[in-house]
Image (cartoon, rainbow, N blue to C red):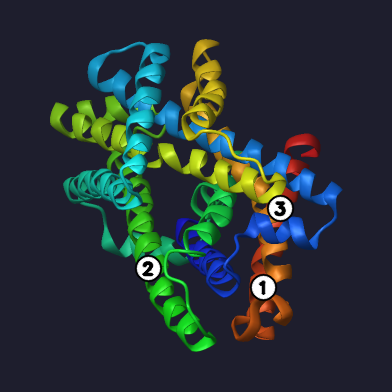
Amino acid sequence: MVLSANLIAMVVQAQSAKLGIATGRNLAELCRERFSRRTSIGLWLQAELVAMACDIAEVVGAALGLNLLFGIPLFPAGLIAGAGAFAILALQQKGFRRLEAGITVLVGVVVVAFLYELIDSEPQASEIGKHLFVPGFAGTESILLATGIIGATVMPHVIYLHSALTQKRIVGRNDAEKKKILRFEKVDVVIALSIAGVVNLSMMIVAAALFHSSGLTGVDTIEGAYEGFQSLVSDRAAAIFGIALLASGFASSSVGTMAGQVVMQGFIRRRIPLFIRRAITLAPALFVLAIGLNPTDALVGSQVVLSFGIPFALVPLLMIASKREVMGDLVNPRWLSVVAGILAGLIIALNVFLLEQVFFG
């Protein structure tokens, strides 16, 4: 599922980037122009909820990292995580390149940490190869996790954001220049999502090689994973896991806020100060921590919400990308529209199947 989700995300994010390059506008702006007012408002409200769901995952994840590393209670840790997110967003005030550099450093910490854990767990290469291509499900809970993996990888709010990031950074003066920019952007998408895929695969492989093979088949929380590293490997390995969790939360903390700005500006032509928006999106995450919900359940649930949000961004994207009057020479060829439509159909089918299992299974 991790491999499949990454391949789907590569196709989807490349489509989003192409939209911004071809039109000079982002997906939210084009939705407002081409759909009815009622549809646009519905898509806007749904996208705002998705951005908040993303924020729950990032803030709760960072709070868990602080809790595990330093013993800070979850709610105060959430406040600290929120403050860290404000600091990261402050880098944007000094230029987008500085924000990118800060996020890159944090992502580098996550990659190094999980590669260390992967090497330390000594997994079986033959089993890794087998399960990269042979899926296995075991009841409704595994479907829930699979849905969450897709939501956390494809990320519907990033579909809106990616179209905005490419629309004005380097503007092609003609179709030939736009095609050249798109080629570079595709390479960027593949590299970025390959790195994300390596991290996600490392987490899954470490869990199987270290915990399952040692008989710890009941590890189903992040806290349990941390304790598992302590008991099976060392305190150092557990600390590295906690640092990776903290860095991951901080690295992703600004994404939901930035996506929310794009969505609001595009759909309703309104913009609020970035820090006020950050405070608003931070509130649901702090509420989750304040009422004492299980952090791991909150994380998984927020990722499932992201999966249910994918069709509401992906279907409009594919509809618009197939219009030559909008895309020009960068219009999707028919075969690509068919492939992307099949991927969207599979995601919708998985979401519907999960609902059926939860309510009627």
Q: Helix, strand or loop at disc 1?
A: helix
Crowding around mark 1 (Cα neighbors within 10 Å: few <14, some 14 to 19, many 20+) is many
Crowding around mark 2 (Cα neighbors within 10 Å: few <14, some 14 to 19, many 20+) is some
- Give the position of the C terminus as an image quadrant: top right
Q: Mark 3 points at which residue?
A: 312
Residue plotted at (34% across, 60% down): 128
Q: Give whichever of 233, 176 is nearer the camera.
A: 176
The amino acid pointed to by label 2 is: Asp
**Mark 2 touching mark 1, by CB under 8 A?**
no
The amino acid pointed to by label 1 is: Ala
What's the CA distance linking mark 3 and mark 2? 25 Å
User: Which callout, 1 or 3, points to the residue nearer the camera?
Assistant: 1
Q: Quadrant of residue 85?
A: top left
Q: Mark 2 points at which residue?
A: 188
Q: In this view, does 355 lie above or below 36?
A: above
What's the CA distance linking mark 2 and mark 1? 20 Å
Q: Is residue 36 left or right of residue 308?
A: right
Q: In this view, does 228 lie above or below 174?
A: above
Location of residue 186 in the rendering, given as x and y in whole percent from the top left corner:
43, 73
3 or 2: tag closer to the N-terminus: 2
Residue plotted at (78% across, 44% down): 41
Location of residue 320 in the rendering, given as x and y in whole percent from the top left corner:
71, 69
**Mark 3 touching mark 2, by CB under 8 A?**
no
Q: In this view, does 96 lie to the left or right of 358?
A: left
Q: Name the residue under label 1.
A: 321
Crowding around mark 3 (Cα neighbors within 10 Å: few <14, some 14 to 19, many 20+) is some
